Structures are given as structure tokens and as C-alpha cells.
């Protein structure tokens, strides 16, 4: 554990009750996030990325349970009551959700949604909150910010709503910003603008960032470290350069191989990962990727591989890691 760790997650489990049984959405995840660091979390849809982020914040649905340790600045968030968590949300940890159209209140003007948190957590006056709100909209690149402050969410485009969501998340100067699939449903041009904006404000404010995405290219080049999740568990974690250029987990390697590249044959077949994610209510006993893995052995079907550091800062949970020479990839 580093001395400058802002967030320490240890053996985190997040289970959710369902008509089909208990969903083991997050099943023993551990990692650190340092102050001022950008961490990318990638994996297929259904791998547990979003639930992990919500479990960290305490935004779990009813009929759910969390165990493990989530230490933020040394304080155990899992032991806090809702009223205590409300003092953490926004002020210390903020979240940008997938769909800003559903996250913003449709009947409340933008200025109120920006200023409420500031007045509650920072204790500023109404006029000061309005001034700060205007500055925030300018910072995140909202055009004509004076007019946008008086607008309702439905009067803004999807890209503008996402920028407003980022402004809301930044309003109380949080130490950690969690961006959960922040470019969902945006066209590629707006996606890049939003991602570049997140990286810029994270760097300028010396803020920690957790960027969650199923798209490898989203985190490549925009994060310091990358964690790869599969079926509720971490398979690999390391510096983004190490993970993308020298992937060692068979799942990470398969993901990279399935990523289209600009020099790929125009009408050629795309690489795919055979099979599908295991049932979250009845996962296999061994490595959860083993049923889809061409390198799996009998040992992979029996016990979960431990997370082992193969290089300084690069760890993998795989009994048959990929030769680094076979896993080269350069993110765009």
C-alpha cells in the first residue's frame, strides 16, 4: 500500500438479491487509488464495473449487501450510515453517471442543480454559488453559460448535459471523481471532447479519477493505471502502458485482440471472444474466464488464481499468463 493512497479497497464483495438468486456482482476486488491518479476500469458489459463503483460510494440498491474494506483517507466508508455518507457524496467523492438525461432533474433549472450542493457542503451564499456555477460551466466548455444556467436539462443536447453533469460533480471540489461510462450514447466527436475534458480537469485540479468503460480506447492514453474486470473479479492491474503493451491475463489479451485497428483488412472478419459471461448467480468455481479461454488447463477449473505481481506495479490473476511478446498493443 502506498503512503499516498487516497482510496484503498480490500476484498470487496457486493451481492444483490434477485428472483433468480443472489447476484455476485463484485466478488473479492482489491486495489489502491493514489491521490492525483487516474485509474481506468475496463471489461465487458456485465463484468461488475459499475456495481463496484456504486459499492465504493454506498449507492447500492435495496436487497443488497457489501463486505470488505473501503477506506477513503483512512476512513471506512462501509461502516458509515446514510446521513454520514451524504457528507461524503459530492464534497469528497463525486460521480458522473452513464445517462445525464436521467441523472439531472428534468423539472429543475441548471443553476439550481449546480448551486444546491455548493450551498450545502461549502456554505457559500446564493450569489457566490451563482458566480461559481457560471465559472464551472465555462470551465467545462458549455457555450453561452449565462443562458444555459437558466435552461432545463431537456433544452440541452446530450453532450451539453454530460458537461453539466461534470460541472455538478466538480462543484464541491471533490478529491475523487468517478466517471461511469461517461460517453454512453454520444457520437465519437463529443466522446473525445468529454474524455479530454475529464482528463484536463483531473490534471489541473490534481484530483483522483476513476474512469469506467467497456471501451479499451477510452482509457488508453487517458489514465495512469488500468484495472481489467471480468465476472466480478479483477484479472489484471498495472500501469496503462504495461497493460496495453504487455497484457498478461488471457482475458485482457483476448479483449485487445478483439479491438478493431485502423490497419485491419477492410472486409475481414473481426476477432471475437467465444462464449459469454458466466451466470452471476452461479459462477464457476475456478477462474471465471476458463470456460472461454483457449489456454485453460484443469488447474484453472478448480481454484481461483491469486493476484501475483509479475513486474513492479503490474499484477495478474492467471495461471497461464500470456507471453508479453504476443500481447503488444498501442492504444489510439
Image (cartoon, rainbow, N blue to C red):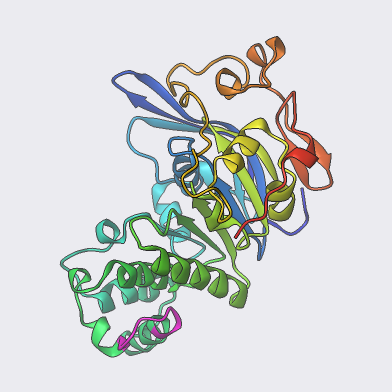
Where does residue 161 sit, x and y in percent of width and height? 30, 69
Does the magenta segment cover residue 76? no
Q: Residue furthest toward the left?
A: 107
Where does residue 142 sit, x and y in percent of width and height? 36, 81
Give the position of the C terminus as an image quadrant: bottom right
Above or below 41: residue 155: below
Does the magenta segment cover residue 140? yes
Place residue 131 in its image quadrant.
Answer: bottom left
Residue at left 27%, top 63%? 104
Residue 69 shows in the view: no
Residue at left 33%, top 77%? 115
Where does residue 293 sit, x and y in percent of width and height? 61, 23
Residue 30 shows in the view: yes
Towards the viewer: 123 or 138: 138
Where does residue 261 sit, x and y in percent of width and height? 56, 52
Above or below 240: residue 22: above
Magenta segment boundaries in residue numbering:
138-145
Towards the viewer: 138 or 159: 159
Q: Main secondary structure of the magenta part?
A: loop
Amino acid at each position: 500500500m502506498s503512503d499516498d493512497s487516497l482510496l484503498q479497497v480490500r476484498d470487496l464483495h457486493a451481492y444483490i438479491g434477485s428472483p433468480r438468486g443472489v447476484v455476485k456482482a463484485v466478488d473479492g476486488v482489491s486495489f489502491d487509488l493514489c491521490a492525483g491518479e487516474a485509474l481506468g476500469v475496463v471489461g465487458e458489459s456485465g463484468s461488475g464495473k459499475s456495481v463496484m463503483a456504486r459499492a465504493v460510494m454506498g449507492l447500492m440498491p435495496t436487497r443488497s449487501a457489501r463486505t470488505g474494506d473501503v477506506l477513503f483517507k483512512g476512513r471506512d466508508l462501509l461502516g458509515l450510515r446514510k446521513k454520514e455518507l451524504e457528507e461524503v457524496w459530492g464534497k469528497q467523492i463525486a460521480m458522473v453517471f452513464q445517462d445525464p438525461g436521467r441523472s439531472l432533474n428534468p423539472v429543475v433549472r441548471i443553476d439550481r442543480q449546480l448551486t444546491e450542493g455548493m450551498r450545502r457542503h461549502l456554505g457559500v451564499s446564493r450569489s457566490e454559488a451563482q458566480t461559481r456555477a457560471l465559472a464551472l460551466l465555462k470551465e467545462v466548455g458549455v457555450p453561452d453559460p449565462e443562458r444555459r444556467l437558466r435552461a432545463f436539462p431537456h433544452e440541452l443536447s446530450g453532450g451539453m448535459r454530460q458537461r453539466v453533469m461534470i460541472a455538478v460533480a466538480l462543484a464541491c471540489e471533490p478529491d475523487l471523481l468517478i466517471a461511469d461510462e461517461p460517453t454512453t450514447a454520444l457520437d465519437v466527436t463529443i466522446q473525445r471532447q468529454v474524455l479530454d475534458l475529464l482528463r484536463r480537469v483531473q490534471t489541473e485540479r490534481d484530483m483522483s479519477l476513476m474512469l469506467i468503460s467497456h471501451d479499451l480506447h477510452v482509457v488508453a492514453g487517458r489514465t495512469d493505471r488500468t484495472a481489467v474486470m471480468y465476472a466480478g473479479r479483477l484479472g489484471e492491474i498495472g500501469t496503462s502502458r504495461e497493460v496495453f503493451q504487455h497484457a498478461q491475463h488471457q482475458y485482457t489479451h483476448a479483449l485487445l485482440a478483439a479491438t478493431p485497428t485502423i490497419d485491419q483488412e477492410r472486409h475481414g472478419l473481426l476477432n471475437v471472444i467465444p462464449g459469454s459471461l458466466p451466470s452471476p448467480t452461479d459462477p464457476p468455481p475456478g477462474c471465471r474466464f476458463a470456460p472461454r479461454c483457449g489456454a485453460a488447463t484443469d488447474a484453472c477449473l478448480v481454484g481461483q488464481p491469486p493476484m501475483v505481481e509479475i513486474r513492479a506495479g503490474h499484477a495478474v490473476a492467471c495461471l497461464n499468463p500470456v507471453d508479453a511478446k504476443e500481447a503488444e498493443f498501442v492504444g489510439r
